[in-house]
Image (spheres, coloured by chain):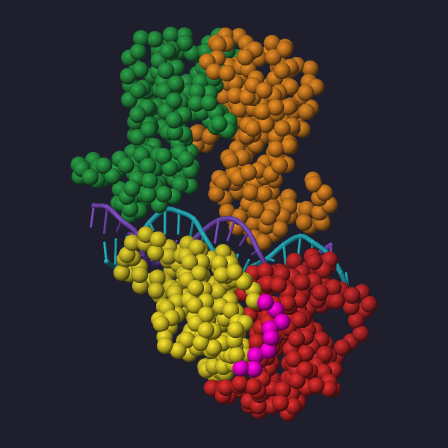
Chain colours: A red, B yellow, C green, D orange, E cyan, F purple
Amino acid sequence: MTSTRPLRADAARNRRLLLAAAADEFAERGLDASVADIARRAGVGKGTVFRHFPTKDDLIAAIVLDRIDALNTVGERLLEAADPGAALLEFLTVAAHQRQQRDLSFLQEAGELAPEVTRVRTRMFHIVQTLVDRAREHGAVRADVTGEDIILLMCAPNHVTSYVPDAPPDLWRRYLSIIFDGLRPEGAHPLPHPPPAASAGSSTRLSTPP
Amino acid sequence: MTSTRPLRADAARNRRLLLAAAADEFAERGLDASVADIARRAGVGKGTVFRHFPTKDDLIAAIVLDRIDALNTVGERLLEAADPGAALLEFLTVAAHQRQQRDLSFLQEAGELAPEVTRVRTRMFHIVQTLVDRAREHGAVRADVTGEDIILLMCAPNHVTSYVPDAPPDLWRRYLSIIFDGLRPEGAHPLPHPPPAASAGSSTRLSTPP
Amino acid sequence: MTSTRPLRADAARNRRLLLAAAADEFAERGLDASVADIARRAGVGKGTVFRHFPTKDDLIAAIVLDRIDALNTVGERLLEAADPGAALLEFLTVAAHQRQQRDLSFLQEAGELAPEVTRVRTRMFHIVQTLVDRAREHGAVRADVTGEDIILLMCAPNHVTSYVPDAPPDLWRRYLSIIFDGLRPEGAHPLPHPPPAASAGSSTRLSTPP
Amino acid sequence: MTSTRPLRADAARNRRLLLAAAADEFAERGLDASVADIARRAGVGKGTVFRHFPTKDDLIAAIVLDRIDALNTVGERLLEAADPGAALLEFLTVAAHQRQQRDLSFLQEAGELAPEVTRVRTRMFHIVQTLVDRAREHGAVRADVTGEDIILLMCAPNHVTSYVPDAPPDLWRRYLSIIFDGLRPEGAHPLPHPPPAASAGSSTRLSTPP
DNA sequence: AATGAATGAGGCTTCATTCAT
DNA sequence: CATGAATGAAGCCTCATTCAT
């Protein structure tokens, strides 16, 4: 199970169909999207869903996994960018853009996510940590801001726009801009509270907005 | 409110118990908290819930109403504060504090909220609008920020901390501070997108984080 | 209880109001009319309903009682009419007319009716029995028809029209006429089955359409 | 019917079991028979009822449909009988016999019945209409009686016997005989009210006793 | 391996009836 | 006495999950 065994060709196809259908349904109907609807949307039987994902929570975990993974890929590329400040802003922009297309941030609330998820999440923490460290060294962000802060603030621009009924697709850019301005060294006021997890290792406990 | 005659003593007590129990259950279990659990927690029968709130949505609306009302009371007082910048920050602090004690922001998504709710919500918009206008005139916030922006950003500090498993109770202050720094005129970068509802009246369509 | 004790003036008034309101509600909503609605329509509290009628079934029994009693009053007068055939037809006409104004025939299905009801019912059987006997002696109805037959056929005209969505108020007269033609001696065919309760006494067991 | 692919063997069996159990329960308990009891009686889970009939009303409609359909089959055969008068009497006899075994006439009152029902009902109207027309031409029934009249009177014999506690199974034959005598030309008196729906088409509005 | 039928726990709501005010 | 608040059983229905086909 944990070791990826080779899936039969059609099984792999169904798996992909299911993940896509599930993401769509969740995005449209929220966490209460029914397994039956997901199956119908994927064009497979209900039983097939449970063959691939023994539990609804497992299905959710798989979706979350995919999305974090996609972000990690981008993040890894940005680690080698020339301008560290721009790289961090770019990362946040990509993350918000991903979430704007389909907001699945609520998925993380569903049950304990699989250990798989913890792994990619840890990877992401390291990436963001590094992006922030480099940006800080270049004076692009204020000294008192940590990688954890960025992880947490990552969802904010989209969350903010979720209160606008028919928000224009790019509205989140406005709020990402405001928040990023708050992260800059110019005109920064001292922060009234220390960041959440000071030690590097413990940061794994933060949940990640997918 | 609408011609509600004074509730009998015990009925009023039960109503209070129910609202408190419901708020607790919702805060702990999310929107899917069951009416049965709420009744049990309030120490009343299931039927009593429906005497006071014919529908689960009605119950939710009552909670939302109470919370917005409480905010409005604070906001009205702050309208007459000496320092407009401090007043706005204070308002956001109170709002975040309320939400930190019990995050019920998801309640607004539940079904069409009663017209009552729309009323207090509109009142709140006016208050925030005014607070922001005055703060802007005093140079406490940047010129390109509107009342709608503030309404939308109001929830962000708490939303951010919701990703931290056992967040310290005051962690939100850190993020409110960062975000408020982003609202200041010093070091502000031009915003890439116009604010959501330019005209004052249409702001009613925004949903309010309770 | 069984012996009629003098009701206080206002209590008697409430009782009357309740019976009227209940009859109206039942006629409009069927057997499932709720006690709460009846109370509201009568302009009294729900508790008052149960003070007068300990059980919903008791309330129903009281209504049934009143209606049968009213019929009996008419029937007794008709016992002394000059033309026995016309008298029987008149009785059936009055019965159908009563039911047309408010069809409560379904009430008899509700739970075991009180012994009170049995009493007036028995009285009614005797009356109809006599009306039929006299009509038969005068050659107005066929020889093989009994009082029980008439009791049973009494509801038929209204029942028949109940299938017509917005039946004209007097449509029942058409079917009473057809059925009554079937009761006449002219052109009568032999009946393939004996009447239900041959012995006079046992007829009490028939339920009476109120 | 509407594109229903052939049900799986066990599903078809359950569907049959359910329809039978439901008919039994409704006959015994009336319209308020509970879905849970029906499921128990059919020996299936509650959920299975809703798989086959998404709504209680749908279940009722299916029962009604079956019964009307059965009558139609008989009626169609009788259209070609040699003696039109006997054919009409036979039809009424079969109808009453069906209803005697299980009186479900009250089912038609339940919610808007499916369009399917309207279809078979219309078919039945045509059949009865034709049976009556032919009987009238042969002088078997009086000239002033219409197809609608017959539809409406169809339930009467059973309704009449419903007032007899432990009625002998064939008692209805007695009242069908009496009523049919009223339909004959011999000794007919003029009817005091026109029949309900004079035009052929509008007869669809009558509800049909299933 | 895929399907979809079956299951039953659990959700919301109604209502007759009891009981404190 | 009258009132209406409280109760809890029962009803209809949904849905994640299991299992026969």
Name the residue at the right extreme: A9
Q: Residue at x 51, y 67 (%)?
A: B148
Any part of residue D116 in sight:
yes
Indicate whether C142 appears above or below E18. above
Tell me which segment is drawn in magenta. Answer: B186-194
Apparent side of residue C47 relative to residue D173 in the rendered image (left or right): left
Q: Is residue D190 left or right of residue C98?
A: right
Q: Residue at coordinates 53% horizontally, 86% vertically from top-left?
A: A188
In this view, B161 is above or below C111? below
Horizontal and vertical percent position of residue B83: 39, 78
Where in the figure is residue A60, as x and y percent of width and height? Answer: 64, 70
Give residue A6's quadrant in the image: bottom right
> Magenta stretch containing residue D88, yes or no?
no
Instruction: Find residue C96 and report its horizontal and vertical position in percent.
Output: 40, 22
Query: Whole-percent x and y of residue A183?
Result: 57, 83
Judge from the rendering whether residue D81 lies leftward or rightward of residue B61; answer left or right.
right
Q: Residue at (71%, 49%) from the top-left corner?
A: D8
Is B74 or A22 nearer to us in this picture?
A: B74
In the depicted structure, whether residue C84 falls above or below residue A29: above
| Residue at (43, 72) in percent of width and height | B134
Per the picture, the main secondary structure of the magenta-coloured stretch is loop
Q: Is residue B188 magenta?
A: yes
Which of these two is toward me, D146 or A133? A133
Q: Is residue B99 visible?
A: no
